[in-house]
Image (cartoon, coloured by chain):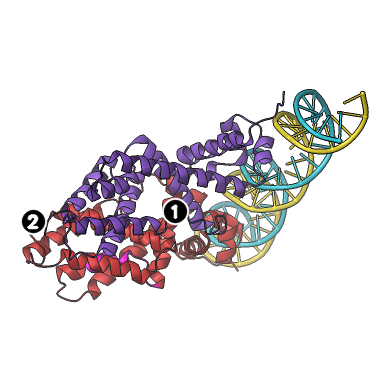
Chain colours: A purple, B red, C yellow, D cyan
DNA sequence: TAAAACGTGATACACATGTACCATGAACAT
DNA sequence: ATGTTCATGGTACATGTGTATCACGTTTTA
């Protein structure tokens, strides 16, 4: 009974099936057929809505990015109003740390993509995905604001601190995904370093 | 001319072919046939010296671990004798940062394995590979030594600092492999944070 | 009402992969 | 000298992959 159908809705449905597989079994388990089965549609439909697998991967990645973005916005908004600089920084960093189930999912899926791009650099053509250093400069800006507010030693270099914090958070997240640490332990380590950064000189 | 042959040498030759592929093209490009071609032997020989692909992967991983271990030993030894605590810490961390070609190779290959273990957790059965927290406690021990030597503020928590530094270094390495930063830039960031840690209170 | 476009199913194709099997000649043991 | 083990080559098999093709009913359009 093929009525006129909402293409965007179908694409979303299929792309999210892929993300679900990438989360639970890794991206290389996300074959076209597996995605079709997970989405409950036929293989032909996956091909119909996404001409090629690369297109599907890219579309799903864009949706994942949007989800992360939404999550960060929500966390920053939840950091209180008006937000303190530290509140924003904490929200931003702990948001990309796999602590609760949702962030675990997002982080794990991102890791799957990261793994893919490491070994197949041609698949994802310079798709920045907001990560590269946009986040880093954003972080640095708020660290500078914290300095002006007297919450951070003015002798600190905000750019360096931002780069270090972000790298540390990524590394902590990686260790959590690797099972070497619990999410709470990672958060504790991050908080500890934030405490050290955010203390009057 | 099949003379009696050195098995260990053959295995090493094949395993290193795999590591070479993992470095340049990623682990999923390392099919049995590709490894055979890279090693310049027939597919049958790869099967002969490694019963299964899993065995080959594990053997190669062990060799990679040994290479990293050797590199760390060399760097620590090169840190001077007698080594200062900071020298050891710096050597240890900058050793797992992809700066020169050799460390780039090792780090990239490790990343390939990391990617594999994320998505196929059964392949590498709890093969610690020295990373988990052995390194971390080693680092913490030397940070404590630096505290006793008066090089680090005694108010610092060595465990926390070690965990943070290691995570930061991993994160920096990841960003270098991802092409967002040059190896020297990453090293500069790390050095900056070491400078901040190693200053008299 | 006829024809074109849409949504969907089933299936085929070409290829890559890990593994298993068979063969063969050289080296060694008795 | 002969039979057994060793090292190696070649190749087949079963499976999974992305993609392409054919077919068919439904909806829209002219």
* Residue B12 showing in the rendered view: yes
- Residue at the disc numbered 1: A130
Q: Are marks 1 and 2 on the same chain?
A: no
Which residue is pictured at 10% across the width and 67% down the height? Answer: B151
Report in which chain the residue with disc 2 lies. Answer: B
Image side of residue D4 versus residue A200, left or right: right
Residue A196, image x and y in percent? 16, 54
Q: Quadrant of the N terminus of chain B?
A: bottom right
Q: Is residue A36 magenta?
A: no
In the rendered image, the vertical position of residue A193 relative to residue A95, given as above or below: below
Q: What's drawn in magenta, residue-wise? A: B89-100
Residue C15, image x and y in percent? 70, 53
Q: Could you say which is closer to the camera, residue D7 or residue A137?
A: A137
In the rendered image, the vertical position of residue A56 relative to residue C30, given as above or below: above
Which residue is pictured at 60% across the width and 29% down the height? Answer: A40
Give how far apart the Cα atoms at labels 1 and 2 are.
Answer: 38 Å
Q: Could you say which is closer to the camera, residue A5 or residue C30?
A: A5
């Amino acid at each position: 009974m093929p009525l006129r159908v909402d293409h965007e809705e179908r694409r979303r449905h299929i792309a999210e099936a892929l993300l679900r597989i990438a989360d639970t079994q890794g991206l290389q388990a996300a074959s076209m057929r597996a995605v079709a089965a997970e989405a409950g549609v036929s293989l032909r439909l996956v091909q119909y809505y996404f001409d090629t697998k690369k297109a599907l991967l890219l579309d799903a990645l864009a949706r994942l990015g949007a989800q992360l973005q939404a999550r960060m916005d929500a966390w920053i908004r939840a950091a209180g109003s008006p937000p303190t600089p530290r509140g924003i920084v904490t929200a931003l960093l702990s948001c990309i740390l796999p602590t609760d189930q949702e962030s675990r999912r997002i982080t794990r899926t991102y890791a799957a993509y990261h793994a893919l791009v490491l070994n197949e650099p041609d698949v994802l053509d310079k798709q920045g995905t907001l990560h590269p250093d946009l986040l880093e400069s954003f972080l640095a800006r708020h660290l500078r604001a914290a300095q002006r507010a007297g919450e951070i030693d003015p002798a600190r270099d905000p750019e360096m601190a931002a780069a270090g914090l972000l790298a540390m958070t990524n590394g902590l997240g990686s260790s959590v995904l690797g099972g070497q640490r619990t999410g709470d332990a990672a958060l504790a380590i991050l908080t500890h370093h934030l405490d050290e950064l955010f203390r009057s000189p």
